[in-house]
Image (cartoon, coloured by chain):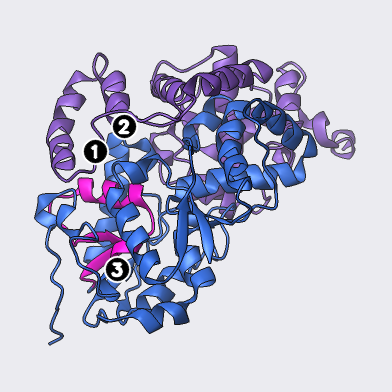
Chain colours: A blue, B purple
Amino acid sequence: MKYIYYPGCSQKSSAISYERSFLAVCKVLGIELIELEDWNCCGTTIAISVNKMVSSFLAARNLGLANQYKLPVVTPCPSCYVSLRRILKESKENKTQFDRVNELMAEENLAFSTDTEVYHSLEFLVSVVGLDTIANKVRNPLSGYRIAPYYGCQLVSPYANGNKSEDPQHLEKLIKVLGALPVNFPFRTLCCGGSLMFTLKVQARKLSSMILDSIQRTNANLIVTPCGLCQLNLEMARNRSLPIINIGQMVGLALGLDPGKLYMNKMKIPAMQGIPLNINEN
Amino acid sequence: MKEMRNRSSLNIVRLHEDTGFIRDIVSSSEGARILSCIQCGTCSASCPVFEVMDYPPRQIFAMIREGMKHRVLLSITPWICASCYKCTVNCPAKINITEVMYRLKRMCIKEQIVSKKTDASRFYSIFLNQVSKSGRTYELGLMFKYMMFHHPLKLLQQVPHGISMMISGSLSLFPEHIKNAKVFHRITDHALMLEKV
């Protein structure tokens, strides 16, 4: 089955380990991802804070490009996911806005459709690819790993799909299927402060530390997140902490992919390099 | 008692304040449900950054209903909002709080009433300028432009992180841009003119 891959800017830069590992995982799972040609920034939380029309255009243009293929869209970035799903939701509710945005896009001969499906990579792996398909490909079960599932905030926002905001389960399901044990902790969906990294760093660090502290109090030996920005932000908050990996890296390890291919040797903080592959359960 | 009977939508606004302001918000898709606010404070209690706000979200909503336009627009609260949607998810009156915060920021920019206590709007404009011109974000350029003159010390503190990210290949050294950035820029410029808020 073919899907359109919308990377979003960070997957080409700070979250490159997420992109590379997710693409490698999809390849093993037999999924063909076609990178959206000429994609642009989704505008994230910033464009919408400045001008609604520009923000709508930025998100909708990517859907317009995807509309040429008539295939569902997959993105690893929770913020891009929310931007794209917001414009879909608003356009369904407000035909005038839909028409106005399409008028803007006509200059590039593009038009988007509200029927385009947009998935986040976590939802995609769990609900579209399916846990059974993944289970069949597990070569290196992650037994011995006690994994803290940190969702971040965007995947439980009102625009997201498939997870109950008060008690999401996608990560837990994925962790179990890979042979590891999910560990519960109170701040699974607390914001890591990623969007405030530049403008309110002290507060952002405080949130990240709260999350890391609450995980530290459990018996988890690994943290997993479906968000590249959360991964970066948590890694930067603490020099010594449990390793923080993204879902591409986690699934990749279980599928027996080479850790180098998953960018495991290129974690941002050198102290976090080299996650032990075999943990002996005492 | 008479006042109680007349409590239909806009009548609760004190007329000496700016009623245009509340009408503006109530007539928007984001703020349509704002008059259903029961002042329960769930939003403020859910907010992970409320302690650094000058007015917590509950108070912002009370102030909007009182038509206190200037005080609301001068508040740093919308600029502190982390866009995490926790308040929106929890709001029993189903008010789209995060979207209202976005709208307040757009109104601040349009009216040129921005608190001097935060320079988030400067960061936003650098970001949007970059994206409008190239179609993509460029983290390194963004950091330099935002911090170089106004936060040089913070920039220096970022250097070790920057270097470790560069070594690991997770910080692009050069900006990327889409194929026809000129047409793209023309469209974003046009969009800016079309709608001010």
Label disc, if present, on residue A13 of the rendered structure: none
Residue B5 seen anywhere in this rendered image of the structure: yes
Q: Where are the magenta residues, as a range?
A: A220-249
Residues at badges 1 and 2 in contact (C-beta under 8 Å)? yes
Q: Residue at x 14, y 79 (%)?
A: A279
For the residue marked with disc 2, what is the amino acid?
Glu
Of all chains, the one bearing label 2 is B
Q: Quadrant of residue B34?
A: top right
Q: Is residue A230 magenta?
A: yes
Number of the front mark, 3 or 2: 3
Instruction: List the single residue furthest toward the bottom.
Output: A282
Are there few (<14), some (14-19), or many (20+) residues within 10 Å of tag 3?
A: many
Q: Residue at x 21, y 56 (%)?
A: A263
Q: Nearer the viewer, residue A123 or B62?
A: A123
Q: Quadrant of residue B99?
A: top right
- Of the two numbered discs 1 and 2 on the same chain, state the one appearing first in sequence: 2
Q: Residue at x 64, y 53 (%)?
A: A70
Q: Is residue B37 above or below residue A245?
A: above
Mark-to-mark CA distance, 3 and 2: 27 Å
Q: Position of residue B174 (x, y in %)?
A: 27, 29
Residue B72 seen anywhere in this rendered image of the structure: no
Mark-to-mark CA distance, 1 and 2: 8 Å
Q: Nearer the viewer, residue B147 or B27?
A: B147
Q: Is residue A27 above or below residue A144?
A: above
Which residue does the numbered mark 1 point to in the structure image?
B171
Which residue does the numbered mark 2 point to in the structure image?
B139
Query: Dot 2: what SS?
Result: helix
